[in-house]
Image (tube, rainbow, N blue to C red):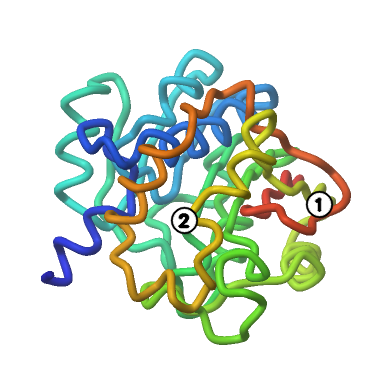
Amino acid sequence: MSLYSARKWEAPDRNFVGHRDTLVRNMSRYHFAAAQARGRCLDIGCGRGYGFEYLASKCSSCVGLDVSGDFLAEARAHFPDVSFVQHTAEELPFDDAAFDTITSFEVIEHVQDDGSFLREIRRVAGLHATVAISTPNRAVASGGRERPLNKFHVREYSPPEFQGLLESVFTRVELFGQFDGPAGPAARKALVDRIPVRLKYLIPAYVQDVISVTIRPPLKIEDCRFEPAGFEGAHTLYAMCHT
């Protein structure tokens, strides 16, 4: 598989059956962020732009940024009222204090300098802005290993590491663990989850996704929980940060 064909699975695709539950988990993050969304909004790493289904109605203007021109072409076709910019996340092409709401889900683990990335977000965030950021929980994604098993990840975080990094940049940080709700206990017994973590990465992710949706009941937005304590078993770390 080529590098592009592998990377195309990084953003959930509604046309790929294996992304059924991945898309719901992703959309639930935007649903959770939308409760505090307002004003001028920026989504960093917007992918195919699906998050604007929740954000656009809450905000006065929306901008999506992604490095992939292919993803942005899809996003522009579906969200003509949103402005989209093709650019890397490390140096944001925006003025200081330009946004009131910023979201960036599953991006920070891909950037080389996470501190600079967060300082750039802080720079473009206005007074009293809300910044929602998520990343995989290292304990679940890589079995707690320092070196990520996902070859596209520069690093992954434990909950204390992630919170400490964010608190070095933002005034206030609320950390949550994202869990699958009613489907969670049954899902953890599923075949794909009983495979040792390291062996799972010998199986292409898109194959795992197809197996997963075949043997699990469909996940729903209301099944996704964001808990402020007890991060063990959380597949994603989710932070609401305030300037």
- Graded by Cα atoms within 10 Å as few (under 14), some (14 to 19) or many (20 or more), the crowding at tag 1 reads many
**Residue 56 lies in quadrant:** top left
Work out whether residue 243 can be spotted.
no
Q: In this view, does 100 lie above or below 164?
A: above
Which mark is drawn over residue 2?
none
Instruction: Give the quadrant of the N terminus.
Output: bottom left
Which mark is drawn over residue 173?
1
Mark 1 or 2: the one toward you: 2
Pointers 1 and 2 in contact (C-beta within 8 Å): no
The residue most toward the right is 229
Between residue 220 and residue 56, name the one nearer to us.
Answer: 220
**Who's the residue at 63% across and 56% down the image?**
122
Q: In this view, does 63 lie to the left or right of 13?
A: right
Q: Is residue 157 above or below residue 135?
A: below
Horizontal and vertical percent position of residue 166: 73, 63
Between residue 123 and residue 54, name the one nearer to us.
Answer: 54
Q: In this view, does 62 lie above or below 103?
A: above
**Residue at disc 2, secondary structure:** helix
The residue under label 2 is 192
**Residue at disc 1, secondary structure:** strand
Horizontal and vertical percent position of residue 46: 38, 43
**Who's the residue at 63% across and 70% down the image?**
138
- Graded by Cα atoms within 10 Å as few (under 14), some (14 to 19) or many (20 or more), the crowding at tag 2 reads some
